[in-house]
Image (cartoon, rainbow, N blue to C red):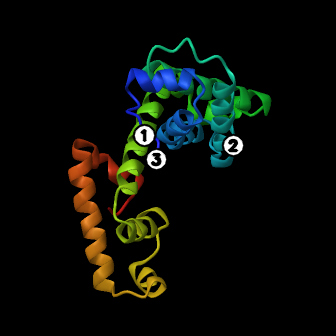
């Protein structure tokens, strides 16, 4: 599997050369966070995903030679998503309604920075969840992401309730250790954790 350190100069060079594997790695690194970021602005998950997809497509088609490092690429992606989200709101003539719902102070730079930070936390969290062993990950997602009750999960997976509780505890322990100080924010996204 293709996996170059995304922070390395070689990675940026591979992107510049149009290597599809590097683009795929970039997409997988930032896609979830950018979708979360966009959804916080447009308040529509499906539209947010379309916007992010369009931004990545535009990035793929453009000359990528002007980016010295991944940090500048990340900034470009977030700025592009933000711009397209605002255009989307304007084009649907609901910008004023959303502007009032959000409050004028929320649409300033601090609001977008806060949403970007939240998106980064979500990306880090989902990255850590993806590292869990398969069964543990499945139980965690069913319980905390999908909101299924333990009994229903146990029935569907044909395992005991104690196994469910043990796997959930293992997931929490792993995430607490893996995420460190970020773990305190997990409850914002998964109440009951």
Q: Which of the 4 image quarters holds residue 58?
A: top right
Q: Position of residue 29 (x, y in %)?
A: 47, 39
Q: Relative to 31, does residue 191 appear above or below in the rendering?
A: below
Q: Position of residue 38 (x, y in %)?
A: 58, 37
Query: At x 61% / y 29%, what residue is drawn?
Result: 81
Q: Residue furthest top?
A: 66
Q: Which residue is mark 3?
A: 1
SS at mark 2? helix
Q: Is residue 73 visible?
A: yes
Cβ atoms under marks 2 and 1 closer than 8 Å: no
Note whether residue 104 is visible. no
What separation in Å lies between label 1 and label 3 (alpha carbons)?
6 Å
Quarter of the rendering containing residue 129: bottom left
Identity of the residue drawn at 25% across and 49% down: 178
Q: Which residue is mark 1?
A: 3
* Residue 164 position within the rendered picture, expressed as x and y whole percent measured from the top left: 33, 78
Q: Nearer the viewer, mark 2 or mark 1?
A: 1
Q: Secondary structure at mark 1?
A: loop
Q: Residues within 10 Å of mark 2 (few under 14, many from 20)?
A: some
Relative horizontal placement of residue 91, taking residue 137 as reference (left or right): right
Callout 3: helix, strand or loop? loop
- Tell which circle, 2 or 3, labels the residue nearer the N-terminal end: 3
Badge 1 local density, few (<14 within 10 Å), some, or many (20+)? few
Q: Are marks 1 and 3 in contact (CB under 8 Å)?
A: yes
Nearest the viewer among 72 and 94 is: 72
- Left-right relation of 161 to 156: left
Q: Name the mark nearer the viewer: 2 or 3.
A: 3
> Could you classify mark 3 by the number of other residues whose Cα lies within 10 Å: few (under 14), some (14-19), or many (20 or more)?
few
The number of numbered discs placed on residues in the rendered structure image is 3
Label 2, label 3: how far apart the Cα atoms are: 31 Å
In the image, what residue occupies the spot 45% across and 83% down? Answer: 157
User: Which residue position holds label 2?
Assistant: 47
């Amino acid at each position: 599997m293709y996996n170059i350190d995304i922070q390395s100069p070689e990675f940026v060079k591979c992107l510049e050369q149009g290597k599809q594997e590097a683009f795929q790695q970039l997409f997988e690194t930032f896609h979830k966070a950018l979708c979360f970021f966009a959804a916080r602005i447009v308040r529509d998950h499906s539209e947010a995903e379309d916007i992010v997809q369009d931004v990545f497509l535009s990035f793929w088609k453009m000359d990528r030679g002007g980016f010295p490092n991944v940090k500048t690429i990340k900034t470009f992606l977030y700025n592009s998503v933000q711009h397209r989200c605002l255009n989307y709101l304007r084009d649907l003539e609901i910008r004023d309604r959303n502007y009032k719902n959000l409050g004028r102070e929320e649409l300033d730079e601090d609001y977008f920075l806060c949403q970007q930070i939240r998106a980064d936390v979500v990306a880090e969290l989902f990255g850590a969840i993806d590292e869990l062993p398969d069964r543990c990950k499945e139980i965690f997602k069913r319980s905390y992401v999908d909101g299924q009750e333990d009994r229903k999960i146990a029935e569907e997976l044909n395992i005991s309730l104690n196994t469910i509780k043990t796997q959930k505890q293992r997931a929490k322990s792993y995430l607490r250790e893996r995420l460190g100080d970020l773990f305190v924010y997990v409850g914002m996204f998964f109440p009951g954790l």
